[in-house]
Protein backbone atom coordinates (compact mmCIF):
# COMPACT_ATOMS: atom_id res chain seq x y z
CA UNK A 1 0.00 0.00 0.00
CA UNK A 2 2.83 2.40 0.87
CA UNK A 3 4.54 1.70 -2.46
CA UNK A 4 1.28 2.18 -4.40
CA UNK A 5 0.59 5.53 -2.73
CA UNK A 6 4.11 6.71 -3.55
CA UNK A 7 3.62 5.62 -7.16
CA UNK A 8 0.63 7.96 -7.41
CA UNK A 9 2.91 10.88 -6.53
CA UNK A 10 5.73 9.65 -8.75
CA UNK A 11 3.56 9.64 -11.86
CA UNK A 12 2.79 13.32 -11.26
CA UNK A 13 5.76 15.05 -12.88
CA UNK A 14 4.66 18.51 -11.84
CA UNK A 15 4.71 17.47 -8.20
CA UNK A 16 8.01 15.60 -8.41
CA UNK A 17 9.82 18.45 -10.21
CA UNK A 18 9.14 20.88 -7.38
CA UNK A 19 10.54 18.61 -4.64
CA UNK A 20 13.88 19.48 -3.08
CA UNK A 21 16.73 16.99 -3.12
CA UNK A 22 16.11 16.04 0.52
CA UNK A 23 12.49 15.23 -0.21
CA UNK A 24 13.51 13.27 -3.30
CA UNK A 25 15.85 11.19 -1.15
CA UNK A 26 13.10 10.58 1.38
CA UNK A 27 10.65 9.56 -1.35
CA UNK A 28 13.22 7.21 -2.86
CA UNK A 29 13.94 5.73 0.57
CA UNK A 30 10.24 5.17 1.37
CA UNK A 31 9.57 3.48 -1.98
CA UNK A 32 12.65 1.29 -1.71
CA UNK A 33 11.89 0.39 1.91
CA UNK A 34 8.28 -0.47 1.06
CA UNK A 35 9.39 -2.69 -1.82
CA UNK A 36 11.99 -4.52 0.29
CA UNK A 37 9.60 -4.83 3.25
CA UNK A 38 7.06 -6.60 1.05
CA UNK A 39 9.70 -9.11 0.01
CA UNK A 40 10.82 -9.54 3.62
CA UNK A 41 7.23 -10.14 4.75
CA UNK A 42 6.79 -12.70 2.00
CA UNK A 43 10.09 -14.27 3.03
CA UNK A 44 8.73 -14.58 6.57
CA UNK A 45 5.77 -16.42 5.10
CA UNK A 46 8.23 -18.68 3.29
CA UNK A 47 10.06 -19.30 6.57
CA UNK A 48 6.72 -20.18 8.18
CA UNK A 49 6.03 -22.72 5.43
CA UNK A 50 9.57 -24.04 5.74
CA UNK A 51 9.16 -24.64 9.47
CA UNK A 52 5.59 -25.92 9.52
CA UNK A 53 5.13 -27.79 6.23
CA UNK A 54 8.58 -28.84 5.07
CA UNK A 55 10.57 -29.44 8.28
CA UNK A 56 7.79 -29.93 10.88
CA UNK A 57 9.36 -27.45 13.33
CA UNK A 58 6.09 -25.85 14.38
CA UNK A 59 7.33 -24.96 17.87
CA UNK A 60 10.05 -22.73 16.36
CA UNK A 61 7.49 -21.13 14.05
CA UNK A 62 5.27 -20.30 17.01
CA UNK A 63 8.14 -18.60 18.82
CA UNK A 64 9.24 -16.27 16.00
CA UNK A 65 5.86 -15.64 14.33
CA UNK A 66 4.89 -12.59 16.49
CA UNK A 67 8.04 -10.76 15.32
CA UNK A 68 7.58 -11.18 11.57
CA UNK A 69 5.95 -7.81 10.81
CA UNK A 70 8.07 -5.62 13.07
CA UNK A 71 11.32 -7.25 12.00
CA UNK A 72 10.47 -7.06 8.29
CA UNK A 73 9.63 -3.35 8.33
CA UNK A 74 12.58 -2.45 10.55
CA UNK A 75 15.14 -4.35 8.48
CA UNK A 76 13.71 -3.17 5.16
CA UNK A 77 13.98 0.52 5.99
CA UNK A 78 17.29 -0.06 7.75
CA UNK A 79 19.06 -1.66 4.79
CA UNK A 80 17.69 0.97 2.36
CA UNK A 81 18.41 4.06 4.49
CA UNK A 82 21.76 4.78 2.71
CA UNK A 83 19.62 6.35 -0.03
CA UNK A 84 19.36 9.32 2.34
CA UNK A 85 23.03 10.18 2.04
CA UNK A 86 24.61 8.04 -0.68
CA UNK A 87 25.68 9.54 -4.03
CA UNK A 88 26.52 13.16 -4.69
CA UNK A 89 22.95 14.10 -5.53
CA UNK A 90 19.53 12.61 -6.27
CA UNK A 91 17.61 14.05 -9.20
CA UNK A 92 14.24 13.42 -10.83
CA UNK A 93 14.14 12.74 -14.60
CA UNK A 94 10.63 13.78 -15.80
CA UNK A 95 10.96 12.28 -19.29
CA UNK A 96 11.68 8.81 -17.90
CA UNK A 97 9.90 9.25 -14.54
CA UNK A 98 12.82 7.74 -12.63
CA UNK A 99 15.18 8.78 -9.86
CA UNK A 100 18.76 9.49 -10.94
CA UNK A 101 21.69 9.11 -8.55
CA UNK A 102 24.41 11.50 -9.63
CA UNK A 103 27.60 9.51 -9.17
CA UNK A 104 30.02 7.35 -11.12
CA UNK A 105 28.13 4.72 -13.04
CA UNK A 106 29.97 1.73 -11.57
CA UNK A 107 29.69 3.02 -8.01
CA UNK A 108 26.04 3.90 -8.44
CA UNK A 109 25.03 0.50 -9.84
CA UNK A 110 27.01 -1.34 -7.17
CA UNK A 111 25.53 0.69 -4.34
CA UNK A 112 21.96 0.32 -5.61
CA UNK A 113 22.47 -3.42 -5.94
CA UNK A 114 23.82 -3.74 -2.38
CA UNK A 115 21.19 -1.45 -0.87
CA UNK A 116 18.04 -2.77 -2.53
CA UNK A 117 18.15 -5.27 -5.38
CA UNK A 118 20.36 -7.84 -3.68
CA UNK A 119 17.78 -8.29 -0.92
CA UNK A 120 14.86 -8.50 -3.33
CA UNK A 121 16.68 -10.95 -5.60
CA UNK A 122 17.64 -13.17 -2.65
CA UNK A 123 14.06 -13.17 -1.37
CA UNK A 124 12.67 -14.07 -4.79
CA UNK A 125 15.06 -17.01 -5.17
CA UNK A 126 14.25 -18.26 -1.67
CA UNK A 127 10.48 -18.00 -2.26
CA UNK A 128 10.80 -19.73 -5.62
CA UNK A 129 12.28 -22.86 -4.06
CA UNK A 130 9.90 -22.71 -1.09
CA UNK A 131 6.92 -22.56 -3.46
CA UNK A 132 8.15 -25.55 -5.46
CA UNK A 133 8.91 -27.75 -2.45
CA UNK A 134 5.70 -26.71 -0.68
CA UNK A 135 3.61 -27.65 -3.70
CA UNK A 136 5.37 -31.02 -3.98
CA UNK A 137 4.88 -31.65 -0.27
CA UNK A 138 1.21 -30.66 -0.28
CA UNK A 139 0.58 -32.75 -3.40
CA UNK A 140 2.07 -35.73 -1.61
CA UNK A 141 -0.19 -35.08 1.37
CA UNK A 142 -3.19 -34.91 -0.96
CA UNK A 143 -2.32 -38.25 -2.55
CA UNK A 144 -1.79 -39.87 0.83
CA UNK A 145 -5.07 -38.49 2.17
CA UNK A 146 -6.96 -39.74 -0.87
CA UNK A 147 -5.36 -43.17 -0.59
CA UNK A 148 -6.07 -43.40 3.14
CA UNK A 149 -9.64 -42.20 2.77
CA UNK A 150 -10.31 -44.69 -0.01
CA UNK A 151 -8.54 -47.65 1.62
CA UNK A 152 -10.47 -50.97 1.59
CA UNK A 153 -10.68 -51.17 5.39
CA UNK A 154 -12.48 -47.83 5.46
CA UNK A 155 -15.23 -48.72 3.01
CA UNK A 156 -17.42 -50.46 5.57
CA UNK A 157 -17.64 -47.36 7.77
CA UNK A 158 -19.96 -45.38 5.48
CA UNK A 159 -22.47 -46.13 2.79
CA UNK A 160 -21.41 -45.56 -0.80
CA UNK A 161 -23.20 -42.25 -1.34
CA UNK A 162 -21.91 -40.67 1.86
CA UNK A 163 -18.39 -41.94 1.22
CA UNK A 164 -18.27 -40.52 -2.29
CA UNK A 165 -19.66 -37.14 -1.21
CA UNK A 166 -17.22 -36.86 1.67
CA UNK A 167 -14.33 -37.91 -0.54
CA UNK A 168 -15.07 -35.17 -3.09
CA UNK A 169 -15.40 -32.52 -0.39
CA UNK A 170 -12.13 -33.64 1.12
CA UNK A 171 -10.38 -33.55 -2.24
CA UNK A 172 -11.66 -30.03 -2.97
CA UNK A 173 -10.57 -28.84 0.46
CA UNK A 174 -7.04 -30.23 0.15
CA UNK A 175 -6.65 -28.89 -3.39
CA UNK A 176 -7.80 -25.45 -2.28
CA UNK A 177 -5.38 -25.41 0.66
CA UNK A 178 -2.53 -26.62 -1.55
CA UNK A 179 -3.15 -23.95 -4.17
CA UNK A 180 -3.56 -21.17 -1.60
CA UNK A 181 -0.43 -22.08 0.35
CA UNK A 182 1.59 -22.26 -2.86
CA UNK A 183 0.28 -18.98 -4.33
CA UNK A 184 1.37 -16.73 -1.46
CA UNK A 185 5.13 -17.18 -2.13
CA UNK A 186 4.53 -16.86 -5.88
CA UNK A 187 3.10 -13.31 -5.65
CA UNK A 188 6.47 -11.61 -4.94
CA UNK A 189 8.00 -13.60 -7.80
CA UNK A 190 5.35 -12.22 -10.18
CA UNK A 191 5.47 -8.62 -8.97
CA UNK A 192 9.19 -8.16 -8.31
CA UNK A 193 11.09 -10.23 -10.90
CA UNK A 194 10.65 -7.81 -13.81
CA UNK A 195 11.39 -4.92 -11.47
CA UNK A 196 14.77 -6.44 -10.64
CA UNK A 197 15.52 -7.25 -14.29
CA UNK A 198 14.55 -3.75 -15.42
CA UNK A 199 16.86 -2.11 -12.91
CA UNK A 200 19.77 -4.37 -13.79
CA UNK A 201 19.69 -3.30 -17.43
CA UNK A 202 21.35 -0.05 -18.44
CA UNK A 203 18.65 0.69 -21.04
CA UNK A 204 15.56 -1.50 -20.49
CA UNK A 205 12.96 -1.64 -23.28
CA UNK A 206 9.79 0.39 -22.91
CA UNK A 207 7.50 -2.59 -22.24
CA UNK A 208 9.79 -3.79 -19.47
CA UNK A 209 9.88 -0.31 -17.97
CA UNK A 210 6.05 -0.15 -17.91
CA UNK A 211 5.58 -3.64 -16.44
CA UNK A 212 8.28 -3.11 -13.82
CA UNK A 213 6.34 -0.09 -12.56
CA UNK A 214 2.84 -1.56 -12.86
CA UNK A 215 3.28 -5.08 -11.43
CA UNK A 216 4.51 -4.05 -7.95
CA UNK A 217 1.31 -2.04 -7.52
CA UNK A 218 -0.82 -5.15 -8.11
CA UNK A 219 0.54 -7.16 -5.19
CA UNK A 220 -2.30 -6.08 -2.88
CA UNK A 221 -4.92 -7.18 -5.40
CA UNK A 222 -3.18 -10.52 -5.93
CA UNK A 223 -2.99 -11.10 -2.17
CA UNK A 224 -6.72 -10.38 -1.93
CA UNK A 225 -7.52 -12.94 -4.63
CA UNK A 226 -5.39 -15.56 -2.88
CA UNK A 227 -7.05 -14.77 0.44
CA UNK A 228 -10.46 -15.32 -1.16
CA UNK A 229 -9.33 -18.87 -1.96
CA UNK A 230 -9.51 -19.63 1.77
CA UNK A 231 -11.61 -22.82 2.23
CA UNK A 232 -13.25 -21.19 5.26
CA UNK A 233 -14.97 -18.80 2.82
CA UNK A 234 -16.51 -21.58 0.72
CA UNK A 235 -19.79 -21.40 2.64
CA UNK A 236 -20.13 -17.66 2.01
CA UNK A 237 -19.20 -18.00 -1.66
CA UNK A 238 -21.77 -20.75 -2.18
CA UNK A 239 -24.41 -18.70 -0.36
CA UNK A 240 -23.65 -15.66 -2.52
CA UNK A 241 -23.75 -17.68 -5.75
CA UNK A 242 -27.02 -19.34 -4.72
CA UNK A 243 -28.57 -15.98 -3.89
CA UNK A 244 -27.43 -14.45 -7.20
CA UNK A 245 -28.77 -17.42 -9.14
CA UNK A 246 -32.08 -17.22 -7.26
CA UNK A 247 -32.40 -13.51 -8.01
CA UNK A 248 -31.64 -14.08 -11.69
CA UNK A 249 -34.13 -16.94 -11.87
CA UNK A 250 -36.87 -14.77 -10.36
CA UNK A 251 -36.14 -11.99 -12.87
CA UNK A 252 -36.30 -14.45 -15.78
CA UNK A 253 -39.61 -15.89 -14.56
CA UNK A 254 -41.05 -12.38 -14.09
CA UNK A 255 -39.91 -11.38 -17.58
CA UNK A 256 -41.49 -14.53 -19.07
CA UNK A 257 -44.81 -13.79 -17.33
CA UNK A 258 -44.78 -10.22 -18.61
CA UNK A 259 -43.97 -11.40 -22.13
CA UNK A 260 -46.85 -13.92 -22.08
CA UNK A 261 -49.20 -11.23 -20.78
CA UNK A 262 -48.17 -8.77 -23.52
CA UNK A 263 -48.57 -11.38 -26.26
CA UNK A 264 -52.10 -12.39 -25.20
CA UNK A 265 -53.50 -9.02 -24.12
CA UNK A 266 -54.77 -7.97 -27.61
CA UNK A 267 -56.18 -11.38 -28.59
CA UNK A 268 -59.97 -11.96 -28.38
CA UNK A 269 -61.20 -14.03 -25.48
CA UNK A 270 -62.44 -17.47 -26.59
CA UNK A 271 -65.53 -17.15 -24.36
CA UNK A 272 -66.87 -14.15 -26.32
CA UNK A 273 -68.34 -14.25 -29.84
CA UNK A 274 -66.39 -12.68 -32.62
CA UNK A 275 -69.21 -10.20 -33.20
CA UNK A 276 -68.31 -8.50 -29.96
CA UNK A 277 -65.30 -6.96 -31.70
CA UNK A 278 -65.17 -4.42 -34.48
CA UNK A 279 -64.13 -5.47 -37.95
CA UNK A 280 -61.15 -3.12 -38.12
CA UNK A 281 -58.04 -4.92 -39.34
CA UNK A 282 -55.54 -5.89 -36.66
CA UNK A 283 -57.28 -3.64 -34.12
CA UNK A 284 -59.64 -5.41 -31.73
CA UNK A 285 -61.61 -3.15 -29.40
CA UNK A 286 -64.74 -3.72 -27.42
CA UNK A 287 -67.95 -2.19 -28.93
Image (cartoon, grey):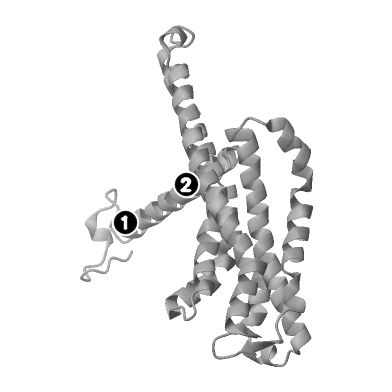
Q: Nearer the viewer, residue 115 or 185?
A: 115
Q: Quadrant of residue 81?
A: bottom right
Query: On screen, 21 above or below 237?
Result: below
Q: Which mark is residue 217?
A: none
Q: Is residue 270 left or right of residue 248?
A: left
Sequence-wise, the earlier of marks 1 and 2 is 2
Spot occupied by residue 83 in the image (x, y as percentages of width and height): 72, 76
Disc 2 residue crowd, few under 14, some 14–19, many 20+, Cα 10 Å = few
Spot occupied by residue 46 in the image (x, y as percentages of width and height): 61, 46
Spot occupied by residue 124 in the image (x, y as percentages of width and height): 56, 56
Query: On screen, 25 above or below 1?
Result: below
Q: Are marks 1 and 2 in contact (CB under 8 Å)?
A: no
Per the image, the residue denoted by label 1 is: 264
Disc tally is 2
Spot occupied by residue 3 in the image (x, y as percentages of width and height): 66, 69
Element under disc 1? helix
Q: Quadrant of residue 199?
A: bottom right
- Residue shown at 60% from the left, 66% from the top: 117
Asked if one can make out residue 133 in the rendered structure from this viewpoint, the answer is yes
Tell me the quarter of the image containing the N terminus: bottom right
Tell me the quarter of the image containing the C terminus: bottom left
Asked if one can make out residue 287 in the rendered structure from this viewpoint, the answer is no
Disc 1 residue crowd, few under 14, some 14–19, many 20+, Cα 10 Å = few
Q: Nearer the viewer, residue 45 or 219?
A: 45
Per the image, the residue denoted by label 2 is: 245
- Residue shown at 28% from the left, 65% from the top: 284
Amino acid sequence: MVYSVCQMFVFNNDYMKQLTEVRLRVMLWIMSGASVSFVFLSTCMGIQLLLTVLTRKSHWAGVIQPYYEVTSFFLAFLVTHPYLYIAKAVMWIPSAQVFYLKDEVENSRRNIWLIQWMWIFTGIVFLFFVAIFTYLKMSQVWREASATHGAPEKLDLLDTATLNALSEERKKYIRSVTLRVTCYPIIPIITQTLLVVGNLLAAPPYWLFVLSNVLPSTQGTLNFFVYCMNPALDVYRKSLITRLRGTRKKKVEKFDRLSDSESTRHLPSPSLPSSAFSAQKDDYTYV
